[in-house]
Amino acid sequence: MRKTMAQIQEEVDQYISQFKEGYFSPLAMLARLTEELGELAREINHYYGEKPKKPSEQAKTVEEELGDLLFVLVCLANSLHIDLEHAHDVVMNKFQTRDKDRWTKIKAEEESDNGNH
């Protein structure tokens, strides 16, 4: 079963709520996001870049690192009472209005190639 972002945020909140420490401070979570992003970058570089893993390095996947990054991002959003579905809608609206003509659309390119305008 697929989860909505609201369900993911609730699941993370229920997990964190079982601990007395609760959420870390926003600054600490920003540091954790940076750490997890670095780990994701390392995995991307191992699989798609020029830096293969050393035989002694633990096998991790890009999927696992993306999951770690998502978890910390959800923790940060929850701690700041940010609804990520709403945040996503705001960003998509920005892309569909302000940035709507920023990149070449596939359909427009195909029409141009066929002489249609």
Image (cartoon, rainbow, N blue to C red):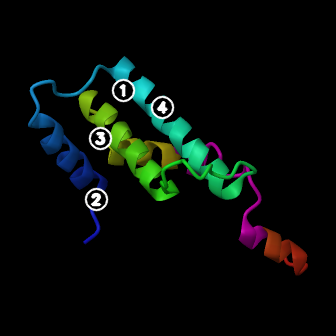
State the CA–CA distance, disc 1 to disc 3: 17 Å
Asked if residue 96 shows in the view, the reply is: yes
Between tags 1 and 3, which lies in front?
1
Looking at the image, which is closer to me, 3 or 90? 3
Query: Helix or strand or loop: what does disc 3 sit on?
Result: loop
Q: Earlier in the sequence, mark 4 or mark 1?
A: 1
Between tags 1 and 2, which lies in front?
1
Q: Earlier in the sequence, mark 3 or mark 4?
A: 4
Circle 4 sits on which residue?
Answer: 35
Read off the magenta span. 94-108
> Residue at 42% across / 47% down in the picture?
88
Query: Helix or strand or loop: what does disc 1 sit on?
Result: helix
State the CA–CA distance, disc 1 to disc 2: 23 Å
**Toward which corner of the image does residue 112 lie, by quadrant?**
bottom right
Seen in the image, is 83 located left or right of residue 36?
A: left
Q: Do the CB atoms of the residues marked 1 and 3 lie less than 8 Å apart?
A: no
Looking at the image, which is closer to me, 89 or 12? 12
Q: Earlier in the sequence, mark 1 or mark 2?
A: 2
Residue 67 screen position, x and y as percent: 39, 51
Q: Earlier in the sequence, mark 1 or mark 3?
A: 1
Q: Amino acid at mark 3?
A: Asp
Circle 2 sits on which residue?
Answer: 4
Tell me: residue 72, above or below residue 50: above
Q: Residues within 10 Å of mark 2 (few under 14, many from 20)?
A: few
Residue 105 screen position, x and y as percent: 73, 63
> Residue at 69% across / 57% down in the picture?
48
Q: Residues within 10 Å of mark 3 (few under 14, many from 20)?
A: some
State the CA–CA distance, disc 2 to disc 4: 26 Å
Q: Amino acid at mark 4?
A: Glu
> Residue at 48% across / 54% down in the picture?
60
